[in-house]
Image (tube, coloured by chain):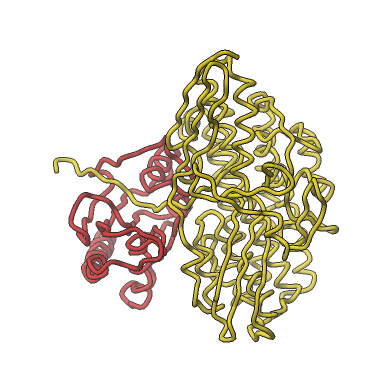
Chain colours: A yellow, B red
Amino acid sequence: MSRTLDLNIKHLTRVEGHGNIVVNVKDGRLERCELEIVEAPRFFEAMLKGRSFHETAIITSRICGICSLGHQITSLKATEEALGLEVSEQTVLLRKLLIDGATLQSNILHTYFLAAPDFFGTTDAFKLIPTNKDVVLRALRMKRLANDIGDIVSGRAVHPITPVPGGFTKLPSESELRAIRQRLIDEGRPDMEATVDTIASVLDAVPDFTRETEYISLSHSDEYAFYDGDIFSSDTGATEVSNYRDMTNEFVVPHSTSKHCKHARESYMVGALARWNNNHTRLSEQALRVAQRLSLKPNCYNPFMNTVAQVVECYHCIEDSIAIIDTLLERGIKDEKPNQQPTRYGRGVGATEVPRGILYHEYEYDRKGNIVSADCVIPTGQNLANIDHDMKKLVPEIIDQPKEMIAKQLEMLVRAYDPCISCSVHVLNVQFIGD
Amino acid sequence: MIKFPIKIIAIGNVLYGDDGIGYSILQDLRKRPSFSGIPLINCGVDALSLIDHFSDTEQVIIIDAVKMGMQPGTIKVFETSDVEFTVLSKLFSLHGINLANVLELAELIGAIPDKITIVGVEPEQLQAGKGLSPAVADARTEIIDNLRSLIFECQHQIRG
């Protein structure tokens, strides 16, 4: 390659928050290739200081509108660990059901609204409506089903209210659980099959690119780990969640307001593809069938396949939700009150697999049950260095293509990671006619 | 399908200063008997979920912080058919999806109520960790008065 290329994609579209892709190639030499994160940092950790353990999860669930449930559950786990609060098996099952719903919702939205336009060759999902209205309606229907799981179990899907330290303030009724179970069978499964057909039809649009990296996720011997487990690295094996700082090693880089992370190599990947590579043998039978149909093989080193791994997980979440509801109904919903009597005050770490990857919250509480210090390491921050290294390998491989094609593939790559750079403030801009 | 005559929906992030005005109003309305029986829905930062609330209602009132280039705390009540939104479809993201995107999507899939009224409040500050600014907090009484009139109008139309 002897080309000179300057790419500066400002405010990358269809990712959550503000990021720019900057690439400079001079006389065939790659001088700069990085994802700039320009979003102002959001100081949630500072906001938590001095707050009571009753409030912590309420505040942290608002770190993110899409992953609010993941933040909330992770926060509750960290608080319970710090305060020595035991939770019941019923609470764990209900939380797992919530995570299935939230993962289903997030993966579906990313696949259909953010990634699919690339596969269909359009700029945004709205352009799909005239030709593929049924696909968009299906996406919205699946989102609603996933939302309704959250509504029933947690009071409401966005910013859940009933999950609290030690349990739930309100429990779903058996008839509500039966009804959502039926919808998972009547709506969820057929919509999922149709989703698989749709994605199978556009698989050729997934770029052929590989870069092996370190894959980090939770891992559990008995289940496909979302709620619980040890931290597992494809390079170094398992370690306890309390050692998370040894895995994340956050560091500051000049081109990003979000910290980067690294572990055994210069970067690592978290998210659906990392979970697939580390834990695929524990997926449901149906999910494994779908993986085969969508050419997702263990171990997959193509980051563009992260979206496909998300689709596979969707099927698993539907099947796992049905199985959890069956267990809950078999045992009967017990009228339990949350256990909120601390047995100690100290530090606690919670780790959960949220849609974009492994999320850590760590809190230290004083003897009044107020936060002394807090640390949150979010999945997108962990992926940023890996995205840079993917881009550095990808650019030389496609350097002879037209500039627009290079730009498109780089944007697709970043989107494949489903990055959530921040939550935007939802403000409408209006121009009054005649004003 | 039997439809609700009207729903009141708030959107916005309560942790971002004046973006939390809609939720603050809903909390107030929940205590007022004159608003009982009207679905009061908080969509928070999941603007896309508005679509789920559109198909079974005749009318919707949406309370939101709206940048209109006016004095902070200024309230404007308008129907969506009366304004042009800055629709930035290309900037479509899930966190970033705004009301304009949702309305466009609802229109395209044919899931739009007959009438959408927006009660917009000009924000002063949209910073994480801040509560409502004094200008926006002071606008609350007037916002509720506006909502009362809109509800009265709707009920009057139905009876008429």
Which corner quadrant of the image does residue B32 belong to? bottom left
**Residue B1 visible to an observer of this rendering:** no
In this image, A73 relative to A5: left or right? right
Task: Locate residue B127, reporting x and y percent.
Answer: 36, 59
Task: Locate residue A5, reporting x and y percent.
Answer: 49, 20
Q: How many marks?
A: 0
Image point 64% across, 60% down: which residue? A360
In this image, A427 relative to B111: left or right? left
Which corner quadrant of the image does residue B41 belong to? bottom left
**Residue B45 visible to an observer of this rendering:** yes
Image point 27% across, 56% down: which residue? B120
Task: Locate residue B130, reporting x and y percent.
Answer: 36, 66
Image point 50% across, 56% down: which residue? A65
In this image, B106 relative to A33: left or right? left
Residue that protrudes farthest toward the left in the picture: A435
- A432 or A219: which is nearer to us? A219
Does residue A378 sit above or below A154 in this rendering?
above
Which corner quadrant of the image does residue B148 belong to? bottom left
Task: Locate residue A418, reporting x and y percent.
Answer: 58, 43
- A405 or A33: which is nearer to us? A33
- A424 or A432: which is nearer to us? A424
Does residue B57 sit above or below A14 in this rendering?
below
- Name the quarter where the C terminus of chain B is drawn: bottom left
Image point 58% across, 61% down: which residue? A376
Does residue A363 sit above or below B81 in this rendering?
below
Does residue A258 sit above or below A126 in this rendering?
below
- A15 or A312: which is nearer to us? A15
